[in-house]
Image (cartoon, helix red, strand yellow):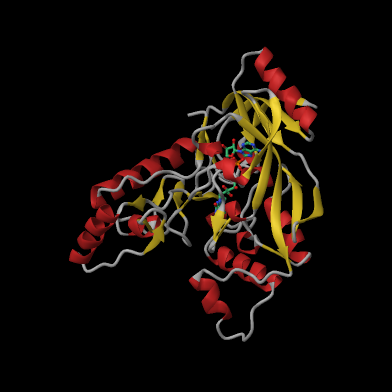
């Protein structure tokens, strides 16, 4: 295990803003992770676990303690009750994992193609896109429990998955370092086509598409929305969606929908659990005076997606935070809804 000092964190994130880590440890094994934890504990330094850095806003002052970058690799395949189980190291690149399982004709994560970040990052906010969420295929999560000081295996039911929620980013935040994940996939399964954009794309092709075709199409759609990291494309220098879609009760939703109707507008919404409605945060942003391409200093809104806040090149974390605040306040003033940021704020 090597320990580096005063390491800039901006290049380790997709937004590419933020200051240095006092210490950075790259942990390629479970032993490395334990050592890094001991290093932080003996010095009473705060610990931050870094995956692919694709869901972070790191403060300009950086992180005063130890950043552990999870670099545990390895993908292995085994049989399990009629399904195929894949054990993937927490540091494996997520999209490379998806590419591998799709190439082996295994269904279950094809719609999650093109999402940046690490395997270990996926359960944290129960990554989802185009009608799939990782909670549908995660069998178990192997993690270092910092409270009990031992490695545990958490079955899917113990992870508390909901929309953009798990125990890892709510009730047990900071308790677990995710080391490995087991996904349960279906060999030869048909691809999931729940999402309208995908259905439309394949409507005229006749017969169900292959997993590889769905993967390629998802990546294409994502690229057109700036939601695929493309080097040189400033619209993808983001943390993905910066705000979660608000989940409203029936009454709240009807109130919002009727206020929109008075303005001759129809707000896009989707059913959520417990008779709730998930409302499009992108729509709220765009109907509160923030068009795609809106700029505030060197931070802005992507030209391709109203929910992606971008670093146009020289933005600081403070610039991005200022823009976030302006949008949040604008939406609240226009619609009375307080948008909740999706990325994790580090060192603020
Ligand atoms: C262009 C773009 C598009 C995106 N599209 C989507 C999308 O469609 N759907 C979606 O859900 N998300 C999306 N995201 C957000 C992001 O890619 C995911 O949330 C991703 O899973 C984050 O993983 P990461 O490894 O980069 O985590 P990081 O950003 O490094 O960390 C995020 C959080 O997870 C914690 N964490 C990371 N790894 C571990 C670990 N091994 N153990 C414990 N905690 C850990 C960190 O401490 C932090 O709290 C997008 C982001 C970008 C930039």
Residue at horizontal 51 percent and vertical 72 percent from the top: 197
Task: Judge from the rendering whether residue 14 lies leftward or rightward of residue 301; answer left or right.
Answer: right
Given residues 169 and 237, the one toward you in this image is 169
Q: Quadrant of ligand 1?
A: top right
Given residues 295 and 129, the one toward you in this image is 129
Given residues 218 and 89, the one toward you in this image is 89
Say if 147 sits above or below 281 in the image. Answer: above
Residue 284, percent across and down? 33, 56
Q: How many marks?
A: 0
Image quadrant holding the N terminus, namely top right
Task: Judge from the rendering whether residue 100 lies leftward or rightward of residue 117; answer left or right.
Answer: right
Residue 16 in sight: no
Residue 296, percent across and down? 39, 47
Say if 192 sits above or below 311 in the image. Answer: below
Residue 309, percent across and down? 47, 50
Residue 10, percent across and down? 60, 38
Residue at the extreme front of the image, as rendered: 81
Task: Judge from the rendering whether residue 21 lies leftward or rightward of residue 328; answer left or right.
Answer: right
Say if 185 sits above or below 204 in the image. Answer: above
Given residues 281 and 128, the one toward you in this image is 128
* Residue 181 occupies quadrant: top right
Residue 193 in sight: yes
Residue at horizontal 46 percent and vertical 46 percent from the top: 299
Residue at horizontal 67 percent and vertical 73 percent from the top: 213
């Amino acid at each position: 295990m090597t320990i580096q000092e005063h390491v800039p964190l901006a290049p380790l994130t997709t937004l590419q803003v933020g200051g240095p880590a006092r210490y950075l440890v790259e942990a390629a094994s479970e032993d490395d992770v334990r050592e890094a934890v001991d290093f932080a504990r003996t010095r009473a330094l705060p610990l931050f676990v870094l995956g692919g850095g694709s869901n972070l806003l790191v403060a300009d002052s950086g992180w005063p303690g130890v950043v552990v970058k999870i670099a545990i690799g390895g993908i292995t395949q085994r049989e399990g009750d009629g399904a195929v189980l894949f054990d993937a190291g927490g540091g494996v690149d997520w999209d490379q994992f998806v590419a591998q399982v799709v190439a082996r004709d295994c269904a279950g994560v094809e719609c999650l193609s093109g999402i940046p970040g690490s395997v270990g990052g996926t359960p944290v906010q129960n990554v989802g896109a185009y009608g799939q969420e990782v909670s549908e295929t995660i069998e178990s999560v192997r993690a270092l429990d910092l409270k009990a000081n031992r490695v545990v295996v958490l079955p899917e039911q113990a992870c508390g998955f909901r929309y953009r929620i798990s125990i890892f980013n709510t009730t047990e935040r900071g308790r677990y370092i995710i080391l490995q994940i087991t996904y349960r996939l279906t060999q030869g399964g048909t691809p999931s086509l729940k999402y309208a954009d995908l259905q439309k794309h394949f409507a005229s092709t006749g017969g169900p598409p292959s997993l590889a075709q769905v993967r390629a199409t998802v990546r294409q759609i994502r690229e057109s929305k700036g939601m695929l990291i493309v080097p040189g494309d400033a619209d993808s220098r983001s943390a993905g969606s910066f705000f979660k879609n608000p989940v409203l009760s029936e009454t709240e939703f009807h109130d919002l929908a009727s206020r929109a109707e008075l303005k001759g507008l129809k707000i896009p919404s989707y059913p959520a659990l417990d008779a709730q409605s998930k409302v499009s945060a992108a729509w709220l942003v765009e109907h509160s005076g923030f068009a795609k391409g809106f700029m505030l200093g060197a931070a802005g809104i992507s030209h391709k997606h109203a929910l992606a806040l971008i670093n146009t090149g020289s933005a600081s974390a403070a610039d991005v935070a200022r823009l976030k605040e302006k949008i949040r306040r604008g939406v609240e003033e226009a619609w009375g809804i307080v948008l909740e940021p999706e990325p994790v704020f580090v060192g603020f």
